[in-house]
Image (spheres, grey):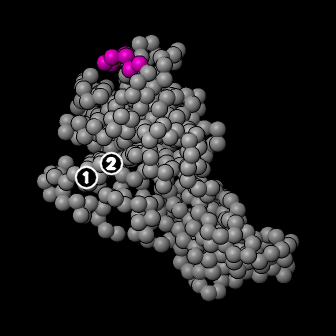
Protein backbone atom coordinates (compact mmCIF):
# COMPACT_ATOMS: atom_id res chain seq x y z
CA UNK A 1 0.00 0.00 0.00
CA UNK A 2 1.49 3.43 -0.88
CA UNK A 3 2.31 5.75 1.95
CA UNK A 4 -0.68 8.12 2.36
CA UNK A 5 1.45 11.21 2.59
CA UNK A 6 4.22 10.25 0.19
CA UNK A 7 3.29 12.94 -2.32
CA UNK A 8 2.73 15.77 0.11
CA UNK A 9 6.31 16.99 0.44
CA UNK A 10 6.14 17.26 4.23
CA UNK A 11 9.82 17.40 5.02
CA UNK A 12 9.63 20.52 7.16
CA UNK A 13 8.41 19.26 10.51
CA UNK A 14 5.07 18.03 11.76
CA UNK A 15 3.01 20.76 10.13
CA UNK A 16 5.05 20.71 6.92
CA UNK A 17 4.96 23.26 4.15
CA UNK A 18 2.24 21.71 2.04
CA UNK A 19 -1.23 23.19 2.03
CA UNK A 20 -4.28 22.52 -0.06
CA UNK A 21 -6.55 25.42 -0.87
CA UNK A 22 -10.28 24.88 -0.45
CA UNK A 23 -11.68 22.10 1.72
CA UNK A 24 -8.74 21.82 4.11
CA UNK A 25 -8.89 18.06 4.71
CA UNK A 26 -5.22 17.52 3.71
CA UNK A 27 -4.17 20.05 6.35
CA UNK A 28 -6.02 18.13 9.05
CA UNK A 29 -4.60 14.82 7.82
CA UNK A 30 -1.12 16.17 8.53
CA UNK A 31 -1.95 15.75 12.21
CA UNK A 32 -1.72 11.98 11.64
CA UNK A 33 1.25 11.94 9.28
CA UNK A 34 3.57 10.17 11.75
CA UNK A 35 1.21 7.24 12.14
CA UNK A 36 -0.81 8.63 15.05
CA UNK A 37 -4.04 6.86 15.95
CA UNK A 38 -7.40 8.55 16.41
CA UNK A 39 -10.16 9.59 14.04
CA UNK A 40 -11.37 12.41 11.80
CA UNK A 41 -15.05 12.83 10.94
CA UNK A 42 -14.86 15.74 8.51
CA UNK A 43 -16.25 16.94 6.21
CA UNK A 44 -19.81 15.88 6.98
CA UNK A 45 -20.67 16.77 3.38
CA UNK A 46 -18.83 13.65 2.14
CA UNK A 47 -21.75 11.23 1.80
CA UNK A 48 -19.52 8.44 0.51
CA UNK A 49 -18.48 7.95 4.15
CA UNK A 50 -21.97 8.10 5.67
CA UNK A 51 -24.19 5.01 5.53
CA UNK A 52 -27.77 4.49 6.60
CA UNK A 53 -27.16 1.28 8.54
CA UNK A 54 -24.22 0.12 10.65
CA UNK A 55 -23.97 -2.81 8.23
CA UNK A 56 -23.99 -0.51 5.21
CA UNK A 57 -26.08 -2.93 3.16
CA UNK A 58 -28.81 -0.43 2.24
CA UNK A 59 -26.47 2.22 0.91
CA UNK A 60 -25.38 5.76 1.70
CA UNK A 61 -27.06 8.74 3.28
CA UNK A 62 -28.54 10.75 0.44
CA UNK A 63 -31.12 13.22 1.73
CA UNK A 64 -31.86 15.61 4.57
CA UNK A 65 -32.99 13.82 7.75
CA UNK A 66 -31.60 10.44 6.69
CA UNK A 67 -30.37 8.44 9.72
CA UNK A 68 -26.65 7.67 10.07
CA UNK A 69 -25.77 4.17 11.19
CA UNK A 70 -22.11 4.20 10.11
CA UNK A 71 -19.72 7.14 9.80
CA UNK A 72 -16.40 6.12 8.23
CA UNK A 73 -13.29 7.70 9.74
CA UNK A 74 -10.72 8.77 7.13
CA UNK A 75 -7.81 9.88 9.34
CA UNK A 76 -5.50 7.21 7.87
CA UNK A 77 -6.63 7.30 4.26
CA UNK A 78 -4.28 9.97 2.96
CA UNK A 79 -4.69 13.08 0.87
CA UNK A 80 -7.38 12.99 -1.78
CA UNK A 81 -7.96 9.28 -1.20
CA UNK A 82 -11.44 7.87 -1.63
CA UNK A 83 -12.91 4.79 -0.01
CA UNK A 84 -12.61 3.03 -3.38
CA UNK A 85 -8.88 3.74 -3.59
CA UNK A 86 -8.26 2.74 0.02
CA UNK A 87 -10.05 -0.59 -0.46
CA UNK A 88 -8.15 -1.26 -3.68
CA UNK A 89 -4.90 -1.03 -1.72
CA UNK A 90 -5.96 -3.44 1.04
CA UNK A 91 -5.01 -7.15 0.97
CA UNK A 92 -7.75 -9.54 -0.07
CA UNK A 93 -8.81 -11.84 2.77
CA UNK A 94 -11.04 -14.23 0.80
CA UNK A 95 -9.14 -16.87 -1.17
CA UNK A 96 -10.77 -18.29 -4.29
CA UNK A 97 -10.60 -22.07 -4.44
CA UNK A 98 -10.52 -22.35 -0.64
CA UNK A 99 -14.24 -22.44 0.13
CA UNK A 100 -15.53 -25.42 2.11
CA UNK A 101 -18.71 -26.54 0.37
CA UNK A 102 -21.30 -28.62 2.24
CA UNK A 103 -24.98 -29.54 2.37
CA UNK A 104 -27.33 -30.47 5.18
CA UNK A 105 -28.37 -33.66 3.34
CA UNK A 106 -30.96 -34.83 0.85
CA UNK A 107 -30.33 -34.04 -2.79
CA UNK A 108 -28.85 -30.56 -2.17
CA UNK A 109 -25.54 -29.73 -3.86
CA UNK A 110 -22.83 -27.13 -3.21
CA UNK A 111 -19.90 -26.57 -5.56
CA UNK A 112 -17.12 -24.06 -6.15
CA UNK A 113 -16.39 -23.87 -9.85
CA UNK A 114 -14.57 -21.97 -11.14
CA UNK A 115 -12.48 -20.94 -8.12
CA UNK A 116 -14.28 -18.18 -6.23
CA UNK A 117 -17.72 -18.87 -7.68
CA UNK A 118 -20.16 -20.71 -5.43
CA UNK A 119 -23.18 -22.54 -6.79
CA UNK A 120 -25.73 -23.42 -4.12
CA UNK A 121 -28.58 -25.75 -5.08
CA UNK A 122 -30.73 -26.80 -2.11
CA UNK A 123 -33.56 -29.29 -2.45
CA UNK A 124 -35.95 -27.16 -0.41
CA UNK A 125 -35.58 -29.16 2.79
CA UNK A 126 -31.80 -29.24 3.20
CA UNK A 127 -29.54 -26.20 2.98
CA UNK A 128 -26.59 -25.69 0.68
CA UNK A 129 -23.64 -23.63 1.90
CA UNK A 130 -20.09 -22.41 1.40
CA UNK A 131 -17.73 -21.49 4.26
CA UNK A 132 -14.42 -19.68 4.59
CA UNK A 133 -12.50 -18.19 7.53
CA UNK A 134 -9.62 -15.73 7.82
CA UNK A 135 -7.65 -13.73 10.39
CA UNK A 136 -9.16 -10.46 11.62
CA UNK A 137 -8.32 -7.82 14.22
CA UNK A 138 -10.83 -7.42 17.05
CA UNK A 139 -12.60 -4.06 16.88
CA UNK A 140 -11.67 -3.34 13.27
CA UNK A 141 -14.21 -2.86 10.48
CA UNK A 142 -14.34 -5.05 7.37
CA UNK A 143 -16.31 -4.86 4.12
CA UNK A 144 -17.68 -7.89 2.29
CA UNK A 145 -18.75 -7.61 -1.34
CA UNK A 146 -20.26 -10.23 -3.62
CA UNK A 147 -22.39 -10.55 -6.73
CA UNK A 148 -25.41 -12.87 -6.61
CA UNK A 149 -27.08 -14.35 -9.70
CA UNK A 150 -30.35 -16.25 -10.28
CA UNK A 151 -31.70 -16.23 -6.72
CA UNK A 152 -30.98 -14.47 -3.41
CA UNK A 153 -28.71 -16.05 -0.82
CA UNK A 154 -28.11 -15.38 2.87
CA UNK A 155 -24.75 -14.43 4.34
CA UNK A 156 -23.76 -15.21 7.92
CA UNK A 157 -20.70 -13.65 9.58
CA UNK A 158 -19.53 -14.85 12.96
CA UNK A 159 -16.90 -16.32 15.23
CA UNK A 160 -17.73 -19.90 14.23
CA UNK A 161 -18.83 -21.54 10.98
CA UNK A 162 -22.47 -20.56 10.54
CA UNK A 163 -22.32 -18.08 13.42
CA UNK A 164 -24.09 -14.74 13.14
CA UNK A 165 -22.35 -12.82 15.94
CA UNK A 166 -21.12 -10.18 13.47
CA UNK A 167 -24.13 -10.02 11.18
CA UNK A 168 -26.53 -11.84 8.91
CA UNK A 169 -28.60 -10.59 6.01
CA UNK A 170 -30.03 -11.53 2.62
CA UNK A 171 -27.88 -10.87 -0.42
CA UNK A 172 -30.23 -10.19 -3.31
CA UNK A 173 -29.52 -10.65 -7.00
CA UNK A 174 -26.87 -8.14 -8.03
CA UNK A 175 -23.93 -6.67 -6.13
CA UNK A 176 -24.20 -6.64 -2.35
CA UNK A 177 -22.12 -4.97 0.36
CA UNK A 178 -22.04 -5.47 4.12
CA UNK A 179 -19.77 -4.04 6.82
CA UNK A 180 -18.98 -5.83 10.07
CA UNK A 181 -16.82 -5.28 13.14
CA UNK A 182 -14.63 -8.24 14.06
CA UNK A 183 -15.08 -9.65 17.57
CA UNK A 184 -12.51 -12.45 17.28
CA UNK A 185 -9.10 -13.04 15.73
CA UNK A 186 -10.69 -15.46 13.26
CA UNK A 187 -13.89 -14.58 11.41
CA UNK A 188 -16.09 -17.05 9.51
CA UNK A 189 -18.23 -16.20 6.48
CA UNK A 190 -20.97 -18.49 5.25
CA UNK A 191 -23.18 -18.18 2.19
CA UNK A 192 -26.26 -20.33 2.70
CA UNK A 193 -29.29 -21.10 0.55
CA UNK A 194 -32.33 -22.94 1.92
CA UNK A 195 -35.16 -22.50 -0.59
CA UNK A 196 -35.35 -24.74 -3.66
CA UNK A 197 -33.66 -22.41 -6.13
CA UNK A 198 -30.14 -22.09 -7.47
CA UNK A 199 -27.99 -19.24 -6.18
CA UNK A 200 -24.67 -18.38 -7.81
CA UNK A 201 -22.32 -16.14 -5.81
CA UNK A 202 -19.20 -14.67 -7.41
CA UNK A 203 -16.73 -11.76 -7.13
CA UNK A 204 -16.55 -12.38 -3.37
CA UNK A 205 -14.21 -10.05 -1.50
CA UNK A 206 -13.50 -9.11 2.10
CA UNK A 207 -11.13 -6.31 3.03
CA UNK A 208 -10.20 -4.24 6.06
CA UNK A 209 -11.54 -0.68 6.06
CA UNK A 210 -8.76 1.25 7.86
CA UNK A 211 -9.83 3.65 10.59
CA UNK A 212 -11.79 3.96 13.84
CA UNK A 213 -15.30 4.11 12.46
CA UNK A 214 -18.37 5.28 14.39
CA UNK A 215 -21.48 3.16 14.26
CA UNK A 216 -24.86 2.54 15.81
CA UNK A 217 -26.67 -0.79 15.41
CA UNK A 218 -29.93 0.27 17.09
CA UNK A 219 -32.29 1.99 14.65
CA UNK A 220 -33.80 4.40 17.18
CA UNK A 221 -30.38 5.56 18.41
CA UNK A 222 -29.03 6.91 15.13
CA UNK A 223 -28.54 10.66 14.65
CA UNK A 224 -29.97 12.30 11.56
CA UNK A 225 -27.91 13.94 8.82
CA UNK A 226 -29.03 17.51 8.17
CA UNK A 227 -28.13 19.21 4.87
CA UNK A 228 -28.24 22.73 6.39
CA UNK A 229 -27.76 24.60 3.10
CA UNK A 230 -24.32 23.16 2.43
CA UNK A 231 -23.04 23.20 6.03
CA UNK A 232 -24.28 19.74 7.05
CA UNK A 233 -24.22 18.29 10.53
CA UNK A 234 -25.27 15.26 12.52
CA UNK A 235 -28.29 15.86 14.74
CA UNK A 236 -28.43 13.55 17.78
CA UNK A 237 -31.68 13.76 19.76
CA UNK A 238 -30.17 14.36 23.23
CA UNK A 239 -31.99 11.31 24.57
CA UNK A 240 -30.08 8.22 23.44
CA UNK A 241 -28.58 8.90 19.98
CA UNK A 242 -24.89 8.21 19.65
CA UNK A 243 -22.27 6.87 17.25
CA UNK A 244 -19.55 4.91 19.02
CA UNK A 245 -15.96 4.45 17.87
CA UNK A 246 -13.43 1.84 19.04
CA UNK A 247 -10.86 4.56 19.84
CA UNK A 248 -10.27 4.71 23.61
CA UNK A 249 -8.70 7.99 24.82
CA UNK A 250 -5.05 7.62 25.77
CA UNK A 251 -2.89 9.25 28.48
CA UNK A 252 -1.69 11.86 26.00
CA UNK A 253 -4.75 12.78 23.98
CA UNK A 254 -6.58 15.45 22.02
CA UNK A 255 -10.28 15.58 21.23
CA UNK A 256 -12.12 18.33 19.36
CA UNK A 257 -15.62 19.08 18.14
CA UNK A 258 -17.27 21.63 15.92
CA UNK A 259 -20.75 21.84 17.35
CA UNK A 260 -23.76 23.71 18.69
CA UNK A 261 -25.14 22.57 22.03
CA UNK A 262 -28.86 22.86 22.74
CA UNK A 263 -30.21 25.24 25.35
CA UNK A 264 -29.06 24.80 28.94
CA UNK A 265 -31.33 22.44 30.82
CA UNK A 266 -31.49 20.48 34.05
CA UNK A 267 -28.76 18.01 33.10
CA UNK A 268 -25.29 18.33 31.65
CA UNK A 269 -24.61 17.50 28.01
CA UNK A 270 -21.65 15.69 26.44
CA UNK A 271 -21.00 15.96 22.70
CA UNK A 272 -17.87 13.74 22.52
CA UNK A 273 -16.65 11.44 25.24
CA UNK A 274 -15.21 8.12 26.35
CA UNK A 275 -12.96 6.42 28.88
CA UNK A 276 -14.42 5.61 32.27
CA UNK A 277 -15.31 7.20 35.59
CA UNK A 278 -13.93 4.09 37.34
CA UNK A 279 -10.39 4.98 38.36
CA UNK A 280 -10.94 8.56 37.13
CA UNK A 281 -10.14 7.98 33.46
CA UNK A 282 -12.72 10.30 31.89
CA UNK A 283 -12.21 12.19 28.65
CA UNK A 284 -15.05 14.30 27.26
CA UNK A 285 -16.32 17.70 26.12
CA UNK A 286 -19.69 18.95 27.38
CA UNK A 287 -21.88 21.84 28.45
CA UNK A 288 -22.75 22.81 32.02
CA UNK A 289 -26.34 22.32 33.15
CA UNK A 290 -26.51 25.55 35.14
CA UNK A 291 -24.51 28.33 33.48
CA UNK A 292 -24.12 26.97 29.94
CA UNK A 293 -20.32 27.04 30.08
CA UNK A 294 -17.96 24.40 28.72
CA UNK A 295 -17.28 21.44 30.99
CA UNK A 296 -14.77 18.66 30.53
CA UNK A 297 -14.09 15.20 31.74
CA UNK A 298 -10.42 14.55 32.34
CA UNK A 299 -9.48 12.15 35.09
CA UNK A 300 -11.36 13.23 38.20
CA UNK A 301 -12.95 16.21 36.45
CA UNK A 302 -16.62 15.64 35.75
CA UNK A 303 -19.74 17.66 34.95
CA UNK A 304 -19.38 20.54 37.38
CA UNK A 305 -17.38 23.75 37.14
CA UNK A 306 -17.81 25.45 33.78
CA UNK A 307 -15.02 27.30 31.98
CA UNK A 308 -15.07 30.37 29.76
CA UNK A 309 -18.32 32.04 28.73
CA UNK A 310 -21.85 30.74 28.29
CA UNK A 311 -21.86 28.82 25.01
CA UNK A 312 -25.45 29.85 24.35
CA UNK A 313 -27.19 28.32 21.36
CA UNK A 314 -24.37 29.06 18.96
CA UNK A 315 -21.69 27.28 16.95
CA UNK A 316 -18.28 26.72 18.54
CA UNK A 317 -15.05 24.80 18.15
CA UNK A 318 -14.02 23.18 21.42
CA UNK A 319 -10.71 21.38 21.87
CA UNK A 320 -9.36 19.47 24.87
CA UNK A 321 -5.74 18.37 24.93
CA UNK A 322 -3.53 17.03 27.67
CA UNK A 323 -1.13 14.52 29.11
CA UNK A 324 0.18 13.63 32.56
CA UNK A 325 1.50 17.16 33.09
CA UNK A 326 -1.22 19.57 31.99
CA UNK A 327 -4.77 19.59 30.65
CA UNK A 328 -5.78 22.51 28.40
CA UNK A 329 -9.22 23.58 27.19
CA UNK A 330 -9.57 25.78 24.13
CA UNK A 331 -12.81 27.36 22.91
CA UNK A 332 -12.90 29.09 19.53
CA UNK A 333 -9.12 29.36 19.48
CA UNK A 334 -8.74 30.83 22.98
CA UNK A 335 -7.26 29.04 25.96
CA UNK A 336 -9.94 29.20 28.64
CA UNK A 337 -8.44 26.84 31.24
CA UNK A 338 -5.14 25.09 31.89
CA UNK A 339 -4.25 23.03 34.94
CA UNK A 340 -2.36 20.04 36.26
CA UNK A 341 -4.64 17.00 35.89
CA UNK A 342 -5.73 14.65 38.63
CA UNK A 343 -6.02 11.29 36.99
CA UNK A 344 -6.60 11.04 33.28
CA UNK A 345 -7.47 8.70 30.41
CA UNK A 346 -5.12 5.77 29.91
CA UNK A 347 -6.48 3.64 27.09
CA UNK A 348 -9.11 1.83 29.11
CA UNK A 349 -12.88 2.19 29.33
CA UNK A 350 -15.26 3.03 26.51
CA UNK A 351 -14.37 4.16 23.01
CA UNK A 352 -15.15 7.79 22.24
CA UNK A 353 -18.79 8.41 21.32
CA UNK A 354 -20.29 11.25 19.31
CA UNK A 355 -23.46 12.54 20.95
CA UNK A 356 -22.71 11.37 24.48
CA UNK A 357 -20.25 10.02 27.03
CA UNK A 358 -19.38 6.32 26.56
CA UNK A 359 -18.59 5.51 30.18
CA UNK A 360 -16.89 2.10 30.04
CA UNK A 361 -19.39 0.88 27.49
CA UNK A 362 -22.45 2.43 29.12
CA UNK A 363 -23.32 5.58 27.13
CA UNK A 364 -24.85 8.42 29.14
CA UNK A 365 -25.18 12.23 29.35
CA UNK A 366 -26.41 12.60 25.77
CA UNK A 367 -26.43 15.86 23.85
CA UNK A 368 -28.72 17.11 21.15
CA UNK A 369 -27.75 19.98 18.89
CA UNK A 370 -25.53 20.15 15.81
CA UNK A 371 -22.33 18.13 15.38
CA UNK A 372 -20.40 19.41 12.37
CA UNK A 373 -17.07 17.63 12.87
CA UNK A 374 -15.09 15.58 15.39
CA UNK A 375 -11.47 14.63 15.86
CA UNK A 376 -9.37 12.51 18.21
CA UNK A 377 -5.61 12.09 18.35
CA UNK A 378 -3.42 9.98 20.61
CA UNK A 379 -1.06 12.80 21.45
CA UNK A 380 -1.04 16.36 22.67
CA UNK A 381 -1.23 19.02 19.94
CA UNK A 382 0.80 22.20 19.51
CA UNK A 383 -0.58 25.75 19.51
CA UNK A 384 -0.11 25.89 15.72
CA UNK A 385 -2.10 22.68 15.35
CA UNK A 386 -4.82 24.03 17.62
CA UNK A 387 -5.09 27.07 15.35
CA UNK A 388 -5.32 24.78 12.32
CA UNK A 389 -8.07 22.60 13.83
CA UNK A 390 -9.98 25.66 14.97
CA UNK A 391 -9.80 27.24 11.54
CA UNK A 392 -10.90 24.16 9.62
CA UNK A 393 -13.62 23.20 12.09
CA UNK A 394 -14.96 26.78 12.10
CA UNK A 395 -15.31 26.45 8.34
CA UNK A 396 -17.63 23.51 8.89
CA UNK A 397 -20.41 25.87 9.97
CA UNK A 398 -19.47 29.32 8.66
Q: Residue at x 65, y 86 (%)?
A: 113
Q: How far apart are the two marked residues, 1 and 2, measured between alpha carbons?
A: 8 Å
**Is residue 348 visible from the viewing direction of this image?**
no
Q: Report the residue at 41% width, 60% height from top.
A: 82
Outermost front residue: 229
Residue 288 position, x and y percent, is: 43, 18
**Magenta span covers which residues?**
303-312
Residue 215: x and y in percent read 53, 46
Crowding near the residue tagged with mark 1, few <14, some 14–19, many ≥20 C-alpha atoms within 10 Å: few
Residue that appears at 49% across and 66% down: 207
Q: Residue at x 68, y 65 (%)?
A: 171
Q: Is residue 309 magenta?
A: yes
Q: Residue at the far bottom: name it.
A: 114
- Which residue is denoted by mark 2 in the rendering? 23
Residue 142: x %, y % from top left? 51, 60
Q: Is residue 216 left or right of residue 197?
A: left
**Labels 1 & 2 near each other (Cβ < 8 A):** yes
Q: Which residue is mark 1?
A: 20
Q: Which of these two is toward me, 197 or 364?
A: 197
- Looking at the rendering, which quadrant does residue 237 occupy? top right
Q: Main secondary structure of the magenta part?
A: loop
Task: Look at the image and tell me whether residue 305 can be seen.
Answer: yes
83 left or right, relative to 253: right
- All told, the count of numbered labels is 2
- SS assignment at label 2: loop
Amino acid sequence: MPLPFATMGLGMGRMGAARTKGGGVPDLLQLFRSGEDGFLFYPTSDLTRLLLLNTGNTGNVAADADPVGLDLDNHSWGVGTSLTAILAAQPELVVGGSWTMSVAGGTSTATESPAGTLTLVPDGANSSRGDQSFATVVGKTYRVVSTVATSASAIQIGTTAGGTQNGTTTFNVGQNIIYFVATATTTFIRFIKTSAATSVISAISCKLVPGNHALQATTTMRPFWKANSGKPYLAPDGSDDRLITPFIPTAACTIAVSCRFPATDASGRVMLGGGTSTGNKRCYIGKNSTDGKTVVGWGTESLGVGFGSDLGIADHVILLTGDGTTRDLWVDGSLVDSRAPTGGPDGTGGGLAMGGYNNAGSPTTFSGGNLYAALALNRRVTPAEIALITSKFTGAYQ
